[in-house]
Image (spheres, rainbow, N blue to C red):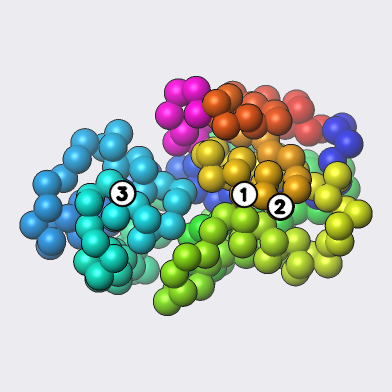
Amino acid sequence: MTEYKILLFDLDGTLTDSEEGILNCAKHVLKIFDKEIPDDKSLHAFIGPPLHDSFRIVCGMNDEDAEAAVKCYRERYGVVGLFENRVYDGIPELLASLKEAGYRLGIATSKPEVYTMRILEHFGLAEYFEAVAGCTIGIKGETKADMIRKVMERMGLAEEDKPYVLMIGDRKHDILGARECGIKCAGVRYGFAPEGELLEYGADIIAGSVSELGEILL
């Protein structure tokens, strides 16, 4: 077992493969806005970061249009898209083993918290987590670091606990958010990061699969 005692998990690309729902919702919005639809690889930019940022960066929208696009996206996602999703093979077993080994588990995600809870409950994962932190619908500018701070507060963690906390995610935002909060980050290559991103942004640990992540932690 590692020296870590508290594990904070990202959701999309780490616990669940949410590609189908997120890309379908993004394409739905772009059709409505009469925008060119990029290829699926380009649309992977929607998986992980705040939606408002993705519509601006990927689609070149101004703030007003991006805000309208996010609203349109969530209208479909909240009914259909969040269940166009699957749990990665081995994740339930890994979470059960981590709990049994004495780890404290939390979630820090940029997905709206209300959707996060529905997904965790739908797939039977909620029971493993002590606390969950996701963004608040209607509030712009929340970052991954904000979510990490929020879940740490909900878990009652203090400054002296930070050496024992590990963030686990699949994108650069997880690494940067963890660094801003003064904790380490493990990157998982089975998620949605472009080739080399986890290494480039300095993930402290890199796991190529769910089973490899388990071997590192247990």
- Residue at x 36% of width, y 43% of height: 45
User: What quarter of the picture does the C terminus occupy?
Assistant: top right
How far across and how far down the image is residue 1, in percent?
87, 32
Q: Earlier in the sequence, mark 2 or mark 3?
A: 3
Q: Which residue is mark 3?
A: 57
Q: Residues within 10 Å of mark 1 (few under 14, many from 20)?
A: many
- Does the stretch in magenta take in 1? no
Q: Is residue 15 visible?
A: no
- Does the stretch in magenta take in 196? yes
| Alpha carbon distance from label 2 to label 1 | 6 Å
Dots 2, 1 in contact, CB < 8 A: yes
- Residue at x 74% of width, y 40% of height: 184
How far across and how far down the image is residue 83, in percent?
40, 57
Q: Amino acid at mark 2?
A: Cys
Q: Which residue is mark 2?
A: 181
Element under label 3? helix
Question: How many discs appear?
Answer: 3
- Residue at x 75% of width, y 26% of height: 215
Q: Amino acid at mark 1?
A: Gly
**Residue 181 placement, left or right of 91:** right
How far across and how far down the image is residue 102, in percent?
88, 48
| Residue 170 vertical placement versus 68 (above, below) | above
**Residue 55 placement, left or right of 200:** left
- Residue at x 28% of width, y 46% of height: 58
Nearest the viewer among 128 and 67 is 67
Q: Residues within 10 Å of mark 3 (few under 14, many from 20)?
A: some
| Extreme residue in the left direction | 34
Q: Quadrant of residue 131?
A: bottom right
Q: Which residue is mark 1?
A: 177
| Residue 194 vertical placement versus 48 (above, below) | above
Dots 3, 1 in contact, CB < 8 A: no
